[in-house]
Image (cartoon, helix red, strand yellow):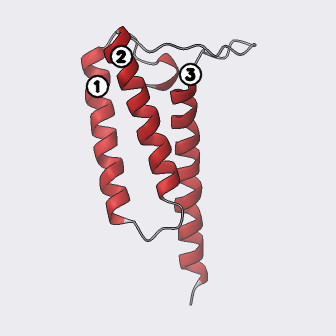
Amino acid sequence: MAFGFLPGSHAGVTILIGAALLVLLIYFARHLDLPLIWLPTGMLIGGAFGNVIDRLRAGSVTDFIKLPLGWPPFNIADASITLGILALVIVVDRARTQERAEP
C-alpha cells in the first residue's frame, strides 16, 4: 500500500494491512532469537500504523516527498515500510547463511 497503490480502496487496504501486520507479528514472535529482528519489525509496524493513522485522520495518506524522474510521491511511513522490508530480507538471509555455515 506504500507509494499510493490501491488508492480509494479503504476497506481492501485496511484488510491487507491488518493481515500483513498479523503475519509479521507471528513471524516476529516465532523468531525472537534472530539478531536484529526487532529493527525491521519496528520499521514495518511503525510505517503501517503511521499510514493507518493518516487514513483515519485525513481519509487518505499524505505523501509529501516528491523526487524527480517520475518517482511516485511518498512519505516517511512509506520509506519506513520499504526500508523495513529490505532490512527484514537482510536479517533473514543472514540468519539462513549462518545456519548453513555452522557444522
- Left or right of residue 53, residue 102 in this image: right
Q: How many marks?
A: 3
Q: Earlier in the sequence, mark 2 or mark 1?
A: 1
In three-dimensional space, the C-alpha distance between marks 2 and 1, rounded to whole angstroms, equals 9 Å
Tell me what residue is drawn at x 48 percent, y 16 percent.
4
Question: Viewed as shown, does residue 47 lie left or right of 97?
Answer: left
Label 1 sits on what residue type?
A: Thr
Tag in front: 3 or 1:
3
For the residues bearing labels 2 and 1, Cβ distance under 8 angstroms: yes
**Mark 2 surroundings within 10 Å by alpha-carbon count, few (fewer than 14), some (14 through 19), many (20 or more):** some
Q: Residues within 10 Å of mark 3 (few under 14, many from 20)?
A: some
| Image coords of residue 39 (percent x, y) | 52, 52
For the point 28% across and 35% down, the residue is: 18
Q: Which residue is mark 2?
A: 55
Q: Amino acid at mark 2?
A: Arg
Please state the horizontal and vertical placement of residue 60, each as a whole percent of the image.
Answer: 39, 11
Residue at coordinates 53% horizontally, 77% vertically from top-left?
99
What's the CA distance linking mark 2 and mark 3? Answer: 13 Å
| The label number, if any, that marks residue 75 in the structure image | 3
Q: Earlier in the sequence, mark 2 or mark 3?
A: 2
Give the class, few, some or many, for how many residues have Cα within 10 Å of label 1's Cα (few <14, many ≥20).
Answer: some
The amino acid pointed to by label 3 is Asn
Picture layout, residue 24 above or below residue 67: below
Q: Going 59% across and 71% down the picture, which residue do you hit? A: 97
Q: Quadrant of residue 56?
A: top left
Q: Quadrant of the N terminus?
A: top left
Secondary structure, mark 1, is helix
User: Regarding mark 2 in the picture, which secondary structure is present there?
Assistant: helix
Name the residue that disc number 1 marks: 14
SS for dot 3: loop
Residue 26's place in the image compared with 101, above or below, is above
Question: 100 and 74: which one is in front?
Answer: 74
